[in-house]
Image (cartoon, coloured by chain):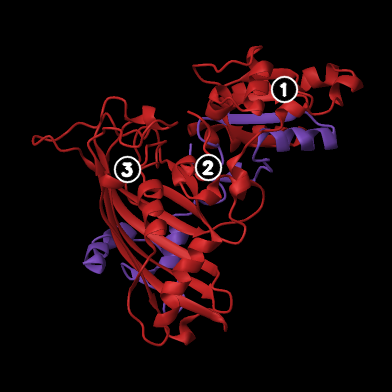
Chain colours: A red, B purple
């Protein structure tokens, strides 16, 4: 996570990227999955198609045809600069034929969750960070991104629940499927690194209501604005309750953790279609504990054995629909409904 | 309860200049949700790495690299680098 800023915000490195086509991807899937693309990736970087342990995180320079020219992993921008320069030198030394080889068919994936992107649904960009005003720890202020996806049918169900209250406003509970997804998969303490989601039985409280506002409060004619308000709480003793999947290893050691939030925001629907055209939701929360990489698992407990609480905030806004905005939610493989498609074998 | 709790956050905002929001916006500690959205959105300097024209997958990057005749720069992390990592 640190390399995002330390390496790719560096002006020299950023300038160098213009000599390449820059691309990103998720390394755990590529090093462990049985997908054709993952096997091809391992042939390129490891010389064999079998799943590999350790980490394949890092920066690689490749020809489009899949020849490895340079690789390395560092949060030091000068080291990455060196890798990029070595890659460019190797590229320059190649014959035209080697540069222009076609992309191997094997590099095309058999399945990607990007294919489940909810074109007519609701796509939110979530940013989580230590709440402003909180002193950064030794690793500096961290923030993280995720996307939350809701299908067109899920949004329609929400609209159908809200629509009858136009002119007779009262708080309308969010559909359980939407709320469940928000609480278990998106109000997770990922501010300083990945953390595991919550099982259904670990949700202590989940409430989010929408209250219709007067017509004149909408940003433009033809829209309907609703206020959003709610509270959530989820807590686990650290035992894994979500079966065999890619995330099971996060709870190794059974470390307790939890999240409590208060929610406030608004959304605007297009009245004719029921589509959400604007969405803003703030979650102010406190988190405690951690199982894996969220930087809080080593926090000392107090005299009563309680973990310290960290003030965290999330902001959810409607996201873009092209390119990098189509990166799937972290826990997409756990979402569950049929529109998401099949999850790969762990 | 919500508003009382959120009012406790007011000291955290001391000294900050916040733009006003549109009428009717829900408010937290006297400020709009829009203002908080802005506050919680990393600025362009902090998030400069997001403005690099990353292709979001290995195969899209390889395909575009072949089209334009450039080498492919591939950045991998556990958890997508442009998502939750």
Left or right: A205 as drawn, with respect to A229: left
Q: Residue at 48% of width from left, 33% of height from top?
A: A2
| Numbered mark located on residue A85 in the image | 1
The chain under label 2 reads B
Pinpoint residue A145: horizontal percent, then vertical percent: 49, 46
Q: Are marks 1 and 3 on the same chain?
A: yes
The chain under label 3 reads A
Q: CA distance from mark 3 to mark 2?
A: 22 Å
- Find out whether the residues at labels 2 and 1 contact each other: C-beta distance under 8 Å: no
Pinpoint residue A244: horizontal percent, then vertical percent: 40, 30
**Element on which disc 2 rests:** loop
Q: Nearer the viewer, mark 2 or mark 1?
A: 2
**Element on which disc 1 rests:** helix
Q: Which residue is mark 2?
A: B83
Pinpoint residue A296: horizontal percent, then vertical percent: 30, 34
Judged from this view, the residue extending furthest toward the front is A338
Q: CA distance from mark 1 to mark 3?
A: 46 Å
Q: Residue at 38% of width from left, 37% of height from top?
A: A195
Judged from this view, the residue extending furthest toward the left is A304
Q: Nearer the viewer, mark 1 or mark 3?
A: 3
Pinpoint residue A175: horizontal percent, then vertical percent: 39, 63
Viewer-proximal residue among A24 and A12: A24
Q: CA distance from mark 2 to mark 1?
A: 27 Å
- Find out whether the residues at labels 3 and 2 contact each other: C-beta distance under 8 Å: no
Q: Which residue is mark 3?
A: A199
């Amino acid at each position: 996570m640190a390399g995002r800023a330390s390496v790719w915000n560096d002006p020299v490195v950023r300038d160098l990227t213009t000599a390449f086509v820059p691309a990103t991807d998720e390394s755990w899937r590529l090093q462990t999955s049985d997908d054709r693309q993952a096997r091809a990736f391992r042939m390129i970087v490891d010389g064999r198609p079998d799943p590999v342990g350790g980490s394949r995180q890092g920066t690689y320079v490749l020809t489009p045809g899949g020849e490895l020219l340079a690789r390395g992993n560092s949060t030091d921008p000068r080291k990455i600069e060196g890798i990029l320069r070595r890659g460019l030198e190797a590229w320059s030394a190649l014959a035209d034929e080697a540069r222009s080889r076609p992309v191997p068919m094997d590099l095309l994936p058999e399945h990607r969750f990007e294919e489940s992107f909810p074109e007519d649904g609701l796509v939110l960009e979530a940013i989580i960070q230590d709440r402003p005003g909180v002193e950064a720890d030794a690793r500096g202020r961290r923030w993280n991104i995720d996307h939350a996806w809701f299908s067109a049918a899920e949004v329609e169900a929400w609209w159908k629940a809200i629509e009858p209250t136009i002119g007779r406003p009262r708080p309308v509970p969010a559909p359980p499927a939407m709320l469940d997804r928000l609480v278990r998969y998106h109000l997770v303490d990922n501010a300083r690194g990945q953390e595991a989601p919550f099982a259904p039985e670990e949700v202590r409280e989940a409430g989010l209501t929408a209250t219709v506002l007067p017509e004149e409060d909408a940003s433009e004619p033809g829209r309907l604005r609703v206020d959003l308000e709610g509270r959530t709480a989820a807590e686990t003793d650290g035992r894994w309750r979500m079966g065999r999947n890619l995330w099971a290893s996060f709870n190794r050691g059974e470390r307790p953790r939890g999240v409590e939030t208060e929610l406030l925001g608004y959304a605007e629907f297009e009245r004719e279609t029921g589509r959400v055209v604007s969405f803003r939701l703030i979650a102010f929360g406190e988190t405690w504990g951690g199982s894996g990489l969220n930087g809080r698992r080593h926090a000392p407990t107090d005299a009563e054995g309680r973990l310290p609480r960290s003030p965290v905030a999330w902001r959810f806004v409607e996201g873009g629909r092209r390119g990098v905005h189509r990166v799937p939610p972290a826990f997409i493989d756990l979402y569950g409904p049929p529109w998401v498609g099949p999850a790969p074998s762990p | 309860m919500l508003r009382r709790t959120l009012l406790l956050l007011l000291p955290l905002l001391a000294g900050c200049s916040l733009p006003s929001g549109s009428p009717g916006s829900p408010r937290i500690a006297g400020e709009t949700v829009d203002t908080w959205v802005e506050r919680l959105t990393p600025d362009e300097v902090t998030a400069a790495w997001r403005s690099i024209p990353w292709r979001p997958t290995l195969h899209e990057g390889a395909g575009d690299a072949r089209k334009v005749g450039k080498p492919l720069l591939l950045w991998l992390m556990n958890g997508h680098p442009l998502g939750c990592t």
